[in-house]
Image: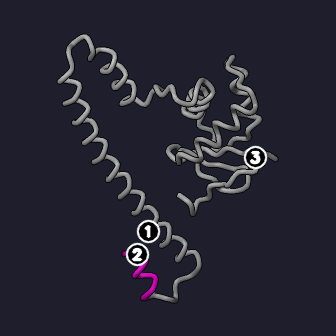
Amino acid sequence: MTHELAKKQPSYSAGQRAILHLFEEYERVQNERNDANVRLARFNETIQLLMKSLPENEQSELVARFENIQQGKVTISRGGETYKNVISLFRLDRRPEWAIQEVQEELEKKGTAPETKALYNTISYLAKIGRLKRVGRGRYVIVDVGVGIETEGYDSGVDRITEHDL
């Protein structure tokens, strides 16, 4: 919609065109969020139906885990302890940007110091699954909370995900 307006009015300044582009992106993200909310509602309904079909003694652990998931608590055991600690750190400390050394230091302060390789693997995995978005060499933004991470000088020799890959 706003894009059509920009085409009809070629006399827009660069700033106005940038704002019109951001309007489009904003609308796109709103639509994605709305679609995600519809999917979440369907998942919720399906999970509730399936849990009701289980015997009472099998439901309690699953009900508690689902409540944690709905509240946004880290419950995924996949990825190990480093993964869980990094996700928890990003949720608790909403800094706009991170350097990998800062992540390491914060985790050490909390008594959960990861091995360097495990930390880099976690960052790479989060980028691969779309939780992080690469915005430059060694720099990432957390997709769902807008936090940035900077990994100075790290080059694993693997293919990188860019904003165009997502």
Q: Residue at x 39, y 29 (%)?
A: 69
Pointer 1 residue: 24
Residue 70 placed where, x, y %?
Answer: 36, 30
What SS does tag 3 mark? loop
- Residue neighbourhood size for the residue with mark 1, other residues' Cα within 10 Å, grouped as few (<14), some (14–19), many (≥20): some
Pointer 3 residue: 156
Residue 7 lies in the magenta stretch: yes
- Tag 2 near tag 1, CB within 8 Å: yes
Residue 158 against residue 48 in the figure, above or below = below
Residue 33 against residue 108 in the figure, above or below = below
In the picture, the quarter occupied by the N terminus is bottom left
What SS does tag 1 mark? helix
Pointer 2 residue: 2
From the viewer's side, name the closer residue of 62 and 68.
62
Q: What amino acid does circle 1 point to?
A: Glu
Task: Measure the alpha-carbon separation of dots 2 and 1.
Answer: 6 Å
The answer to whether residue 87 is left or right of residue 76 is right
Along the polypeptide, which appears first: circle 2 or circle 1? 2
The answer to whether residue 25 is left or right of residue 61 is right
Q: What amino acid does circle 3 point to?
A: Ser
Task: Measure the alpha-carbon separation of dots 2 and 3.
Answer: 41 Å
- Tag 1 near tag 3, CB within 8 Å: no
The secondary structure that most of the magenta stretch takes on is helix
Q: What amino acid does circle 2 point to?
A: Thr
Q: How is the image coloured?
A: one colour
What SS does tag 2 mark? helix
The segment highlighted magenta reads 1-8
Q: Which callout, 2 or 3, points to the residue nearer the camera?
A: 3
Residue 28 lies in the magenta stretch: no
Residue 161 against residue 164 in the figure, above or below = above
